[in-house]
């Protein structure tokens, strides 16, 4: 049996009297696109934050590739290979694509200029950024020195995903990547998601967009009232079934049994 790459059991997160995660389980298998769906306030963000180090759960355990982990911060989770691309992208609009790709991990010039004078190795950063965007078929972006604010929404999302895929990530988490995008741009981002999977990197996709979820997900984690209700395969159920499960109007057979 294949082991999950990212695994959590019994996660609990309380905010005062609100229990955002109520003994929640989670499994991400190698190389899969796992969608996470759930009603507003179901606790999806809390789950993703716990898995990516943005909040520390009060109870429960998380393992990455079979090793128990406790992330103190998103930087810590990132150092372990978990990259999270948030809906509100953590990008600096005025900086170039290359600068944005390297934010926080800039390459310095070799020797004394880099080590002591902190000078950036721009040619190396630009070549790397170009190569990564190229790999992901994002070379409609002409100029790597273009400011991110001049890119379209889809292109920005592309840069963020390329950044996540470029740094040896083990897991990429995408929070509502198509929410702010038009039809054409969403299409590109969905292609990109498949592309990242084809590189063997598993993806967690949080989305309210059922057609997008059903189009790309291998499995769908349905989150309800702070915990995992069920995991379904898109071929086994319709979109309206999924929505009914999410809202509690219906119960999946495997849960009812
Ligand atoms: N920082 C916080 N302080 C207090 N309560 C919080 C905090 N973060 C989340 N909650 C509460 O925890 C519950 C779960 O919220 P969460 O954001 O995880 O849900 P969600 O499924 O992501 O919702 P949405 O789809 O609306 O973004 C909600 O009742 C929310 O009000």
Image: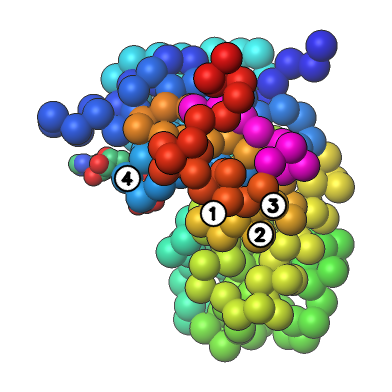
Q: CA distance from mark 1 to mark 4?
A: 13 Å
Magenta-tinted stretch: 229-237
Query: Residues at badges 3 and 2 in contact (C-beta under 8 Å)?
Result: yes
Which quarter of the picture shows residue 96? bottom right
Is the CB of mark 1 within 8 Å of ligand 1? no
Query: In the drawing, what numbered circle is on residue 119?
Result: none
Residue at 42%, 27% in the rendered image: 227
* Mark 4 or mark 3: whose residue is earlier in sequence: 4
Which quarter shows the C terminus?
top right
Residue 117 shown left or right of residue 56 in the figure: right
Residue 72 shown left or right of residue 106 in the figure: left
Look at the picture and state if 74 lies above or below 229.
Answer: below
Query: Residues at badges 1 and 2 in contact (C-beta under 8 Å)?
Result: yes
Which quarter of the picture shows residue 45? top left
Residue 51 position within the rendered picture, expressed as x and y whole percent measured from the top left: 49, 32
Structural crowding at the residue carrying mark 1, measured as other residues with C-alpha within 10 Å and reported as few (<14), some (14–19) or many (≥20): many
């Amino acid at each position: 049996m294949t082991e999950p790459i990212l695994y959590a059991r019994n996660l609990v997160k309380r905010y005062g009297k609100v229990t955002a995660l109520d003994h929640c389980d989670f499994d991400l298998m190698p190389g899969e696109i796992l969608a996470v769906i759930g009603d507003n306030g179901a606790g999806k963000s809390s789950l993703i934050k716990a898995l990516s180090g943005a909040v520390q759960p009060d109870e429960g355990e998380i393992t990455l590739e079979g090793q128990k982990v406790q992330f103190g911060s998103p930087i810590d989770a990132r150092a372990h290979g978990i990259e999270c691309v948030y809906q509100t992208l953590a990008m600096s609009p005025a900086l170039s694509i290359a600068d944005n790709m390297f934010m926080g991990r800039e390459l310095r010039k070799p020797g004394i200029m880099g080590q002591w004078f902190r000078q950036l190795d721009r040619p190396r950063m630009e070549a790397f950024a170009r190569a990564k965007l190229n790999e992901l078929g994002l070379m409609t972006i002409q100029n790597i020195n273009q400011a991110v604010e001049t890119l379209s929404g889809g292109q920005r999302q592309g840069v963020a995903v390329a950044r996540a895929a470029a740094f040896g990530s083990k897991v990429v988490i995408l929070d509502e990547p198509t929410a702010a995008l038009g039809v054409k741009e969403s299409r590109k981002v969905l292609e990109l998601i498949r592309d990242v999977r084809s590189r063997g990197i598993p993806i967690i996709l949080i989305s309210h967009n059922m057609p997008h979820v059903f189009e790309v997900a291998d499995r769908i984690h349905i989150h309800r009232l702070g915990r995992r209700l069920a995991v379904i395969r898109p071929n086994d159920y319709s979109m309206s079934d999924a929505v009914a499960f999410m809202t509690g109007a219906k119960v999946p057979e495997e849960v009812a049994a």
